[in-house]
Image (cartoon, coloured by chain):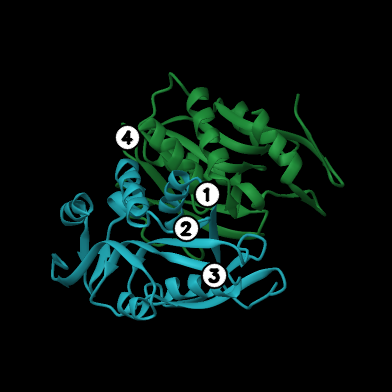
Chain colours: A cyan, B green
Amino acid sequence: MELLKQRILEQGQVLPGGIIKVGDFLNHMIDVRLADEIAREFVRRFAGKPISKVLTIEASGIAFGVLVALRLDVPLVFAKKQRGSNSGADTFYQARVHSYTKNIDYTMTVSKKYIMPEDHVLIVDDFLALGEAAQGMISLVDQAGAQLSGLGIVIEKAYQSGGQLLRAQGVKVESLARIQSVDNESITFVD
Amino acid sequence: MELLKQRILEQGQVLPGGIIKVGDFLNHMIDVRLADEIAREFVRRFAGKPISKVLTIEASGIAFGVLVALRLDVPLVFAKKQRGSNSGADTFYQARVHSYTKNIDYTMTVSKKYIMPEDHVLIVDDFLALGEAAQGMISLVDQAGAQLSGLGIVIEKAYQSGGQLLRAQGVKVESLARIQSVDNESITFVD
């Protein structure tokens, strides 16, 4: 998605360690026109796939999730992050996830009421790197016995293994900007 | 907003201690059609007020914030919740907030880049009870030297003091459903 790549080049910041900051327009302050274009692009890329729910994870995934869900006219479900031990396993699907960005473990939870076996679930998130959050959300969908329609990602760090692993699992992954490498202050995209 | 009140009566759950659960349609699974109607109603109620940014707090405020910002064609900024000590006071506006719902203290932060003195800020959030989160966000706006356009709230617990205090401060507070009382399983609205 050219518009998104341009904005990443113009406004993205590269910090030491290859951390990419897009808070100026994507996940702290949000350019809602761009976010809406992103949502439209996801809808185009998953056209023809049955989708009955959009699933994301708090917090920054919600902005994109709600816009995609609005265009598809289906409910948005967002998984919650919970520090500490697993409780409420009778009412929640849960997945234990390690965040490499924040170097913490957390439990991702979603109420069993909100994903049903007959659902076709599109997962939406802002970043894909090692795929920990994505695999956690896929686990929630699996636990519910629902169908996974695919994974819509705003920015994929293609130099990390998450996307490759997911595609090898047969998951339809659509990433709107795939970053091939980050060197000093320079970002290069795949293609 | 009648549509919202109906949904609260139909799908809201009252737990012991007067806790109101609206996860079925507002803040875990989100009915995006209803959320979009909520956003339109906020836009109507703040028509004529200058608004250059919408401010909310993660996580569930983001869904409403992004839809309001989209209709107003202004950026959405969301404050982040941070456990632990204040750090980064040079780059972030911060407010210390106590959450009575979760019985924790947290620091609300927003990058100084994203609220400027010339901004007119509309704050949007899903719940207003004692007003801790709202006062924290107002403090962020004040720290930035920006103007507060008002406060748009989806559900106000009018039997708690937050709304009254804010209105006494001269803040324009627009709550789409004002709950007067919660008894056993019965919810009564103001008016």
Name the spot of residue B132 as percent of width and height, x first: 60, 46
Mark number, residue A65 = none
Mark number, residue A74 = 1
Is residue B109 shown to the viewer in this render?
yes
Name the spot of residue B152 as percent of width and height, x first: 54, 34
Mark number, residue A141 = 3
In this rendered view, identify the residue nearer to me: A101 or B161.
A101
- Please give the name of the residue rendered at 37% of the width and 54% of the height, measured from the top-left corner: A47
Q: Tell me the crowding category of disc 1: few under 14, some 14 to 19, or many 20 or more residues within 10 angstroms, Cα based.
A: some
- Please give the name of the residue rendered at 32% of the width and 56% of the height, measured from the top-left corner: A45
Q: Do the CB atoms of the residues marked 2 and 4 lie less than 8 Å apart?
A: no
Q: Tell me the crowding category of disc 3: few under 14, some 14 to 19, or many 20 or more residues within 10 angstroms, Cα based.
A: many
In this rendered view, identify the residue nearer to me: B53 or A148.
A148
Amino acid residing under circle 2: Pro
Looking at the rendered structure, the secondary structure element under dot 3 is helix
Q: Do the CB atoms of the residues marked 3 and 2 lie less than 8 Å apart?
A: no
Real-space Cα distance between discs 4 and 1? Answer: 39 Å
Mark number, residue A50 = 2
Q: Residue furthest top?
A: B48
Q: Do the CB atoms of the residues marked 4 and 3 lie less than 8 Å apart?
A: no
In this rendered view, identify the residue nearer to me: B46 or B137.
B46
Amino acid residing under circle 3: Val
Q: Disc 4 or disc 3, which is closer to the eye?
A: 3
Looking at the rendered structure, the secondary structure element under dot 4 is loop
Amino acid residing under circle 4: Pro
Looking at the rendered structure, the secondary structure element under dot 1 is loop
Looking at the rendered structure, the secondary structure element under dot 2 is loop
Mark number, residue B117 = 4
Name the spot of residue B4 as percent of width and height, x first: 65, 35
Amino acid residing under circle 1: Val
